[in-house]
Amino acid sequence: MKGRYDDENLKWIPVLILAIFLFPFILKGATSSYKYYLYVLNIAGIYMILTIGLDLLSGFTGLMSLGHAAFLAIGAYSSAILVDQVGIPFELSIFISPVIAGLFGLVIGFPALRIEGMYLGLTTMGFGFIVKRLIIALREWTGGSAGMPVSKATIFGFTINNDWDNYFMIYSFVIISVIIARRIVISKLGRAFMAIRDSEQAAQASGINLAKYKMLSFFISGLFAGFAGVLFAHTSHFISTDHFDILLSIYFIVMVLIGGAGSIYGAVLGTLFIVLMENLFIPLFKDGLAKYIHLEAGDFQAFIFGFIMLLFIIFQPLGLYGMWLKIRIYWKLFPFNPRRRST
Amino acid sequence: MNDVLTGLLQESVSGIALGCIYALIAFGFTLIYRATEVVNFAQGELMMVGAYVNFFFVTQFSGVLGGVNFWVYLFAFAGSIIFAILFGILLDYIINRPLKDEPVFSVIMATISLAIILRSLTAIIAGPISLVPASPFGDNTFNIGSVVISILDISIIIWTIVLMAIFYFFFNKTRWGIAMKATSTDPEAAQLMGIPIKQVYRFVWIFAALVGVIGGVLLAPRMALLDTNISYLGLKAFPAAILGGFGSIPGAVVGGIILGIIETISMGTLSFHFEWVKEINDIIVWIVLIVVLMIRPNGLFGIAKVKRV
C-alpha cells in the first residue's frame, strides 16, 4: 500500500525547511549586500504564495486566469484599510483580507461557469482592469492613483521591521501554503479539480458538481492571492495601483507555466526562477556586458529577460518541473529499470 | 439637442476609424488562432513595430526625395509591407517551427516573450524620445452638414475595407486561402490531402505580421506622439476579438468597430454629460465584454464547439 505522499521523499523535507531558515545567516556571512538579496527573495516568496494558488486554479482545475494581480491588490488594499483605518489587528487581518479576496474570486468564478478557455482568460483580464479602476475610484479610502502608505506588521507585539524579519515571516507562510496546497491536491477536492481539468463532461458524469468545484477553485485561489497581498502590503509599506499592473498578471501565469503547470513545487520553482532572473542574474549579466558594449537604454534588461525566456521555452517547453522529472527518471532508470510512475 | 446629435455622429465616425484599427489587430489574433489555436500576445507589438518602421522609412525617403510628398508615403508604405513579409517569415522560423509539436501554452509563452523582446528592442533602437509621426493628409477635414470629419479617419476606414475585401477574396477564392481554411479545420486531414501545412503556417504568420504592420502604419498619424506604449493597444484589441467570437473573421471586424464606437462616445459625449462616466472610461470596453460574454459565452459570432467525450 502506498503512502499519501508517495511521489516525494519525505525525509528531505525537514532538511529543506531547515535550509530555508538557515539561508539568511549563510547569506549574511557570505556577502555584505545580503539585504538586497533578502529583499528579492521576499518578493519571490510573496509571489510564490500567489502562484501556488494560481496553479491550483489554472494548473489543476484548468481555468485560465489573466487577472490574478487583481486579487493581490484586493488583499493588499483590504488589509491596509482594515489595519490602518478600521483598526483591526494584523493577526485578524491575515484571516479577514484573504477571505475578501476569495469572495471576489467567487464573483469572477460565477461567469466562469459558462465561459471557458481564452474567453475566461480575457474575462479575468477585464476583471483585473475593473478592480484597478475601482481602487482609483474609491480614493477616500485607497488614496487613488497616488497610492497609500501601510503600517508595519505586528504579530503578537513583535513588530516586523526590516527585510530580515520579513524573510522569516514570509517563508514561514510559504511553507504553510505549500503544505496546505499539497493537502488540497491529494484530497477529494484536488481530485475533483483534476477531473474537471481533464474532462468536464466525464467529471460531471462521475457526480462532480461542476458549479460548486469551479467556484471553490476560484475561492481558494483568491484566498492564496489575497494572503500574498496582505504580506505584500505590510512588507513593502507602500502600495499603489502601479504595483498591480496587468503585465504582472501575465507574469504570474508565465511563472506557473515555466515551472510546469499542475505541480505545486513547479509553481514555487518557476516563481523563484523568474524573480531571481529578473532581479539578480540579468542586472549582473548586464553589468558584465557593459564593460564591452556601450549601453544606455534601460530596456536592455527587458530585452535579455525576453530573450532568455524565449530560448528557455524553445529548448525546454515543459518547464522546470518537467526538466526535473526528466533528470529524475533518467537517474532512476540509470542502472536498471524500476517501475515508472505516470505523473 | 441638435448639438448632441452632431457630436454623436462625429464621434461615431472617429470611433469607426479607431474600431478599424482594433479590427485589424483582432484580425491578426483571429488568423493565428484559427490556424494554430495559439493566442498571439505579440500582435500589438507587431503593430508598434509597423508604426516605427514606417516612420523610419518616411524620414529616410524624405531625405532622399527631398521633402515630404505623396511619393514618400507611398514608398514608405511599400517598404513597410516588404518588411512585414520578411518579418512574418522570421517569426515563423523563431516561434512556430521550433515549437510545432509542443503544447499550445508553450507557444503562447513564446509569443509573450516575443512581445517583451520587440517592445524593448524597439525602445533600444529608437531611443527614449517620443517621435512625432507625420500624416499624409495633415489635419485636413471636410464637413457634411455640421459634422466635421477628418480625412485621415476616412482613409483608415477605406483602407480597412479594401484590406478586408482582399482577405475575403483570398480566403474564399484562391487555392492558398482554401488550403488555409482546411488546415485550420483539421491539420491532419489537410496534410493527408496533400496540403503543405508548413507553408500554410508560414503564410498565416506573414498575414498576421502584415495586418499588424498595416494597422501600425494607419494608426501612427492618429496618435500625437509615437512611443512604445502604443503596443498596449494590442491588449485593447483582445476584447474586440473576443467580443466577435475568437476565430471568427467577421466577428473581429464587428467587435472592433463596436468597441471603437463605444470607447469614443463614452470619452466624448457621455463623459461630457454624465460626470461618473469619466471614472469608467478606460474600462467600459471590458465591462461591455463581460456583459456580452455572460449572455453569449462564445462571443457574438462564435459557434459553440460540440464536445465529444
Image: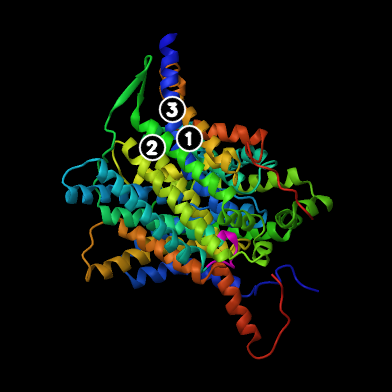
**Real-space CA distance between mark 2 and mark 1, rounded to the nearest whole angstrom:** 12 Å
Q: Is residue B6 visible?
A: yes
Residue A147: numbered disc = 2
Residue A81: numbered disc = 1
- Identify the magenta region: B99-105
Q: Which-is-in-front pick, marks 2 and 3?
A: 3
Q: Which-is-in-front pick, marks 2 and 1?
A: 2
Q: Amino acid at mark 3?
A: Thr
**Real-space CA distance between mark 3 and mark 1, rounded to the nearest whole angstrom:** 35 Å
How far across and how far down the image is residue A42, in percent? 44, 57
Taking the view exactly as shown, the residue that stands out farthest to the bottom is A335
Is B67 in front, or is A152?
B67
How far across and how far down the image is residue A19, in percent? 50, 71
Chain of the residue where label 1 is placed in the rendered structure: A
- At 72% from the left and 75% from the top, the residue drawn is A341
Instruction: Describe the element under mark 3 as helix, strand or loop.
Output: helix
Q: Amino acid at mark 1?
A: Ile
How far across and how far down the image is residue A109, in percent? 65, 41
User: Circle 3 sits on which residue?
Assistant: B264
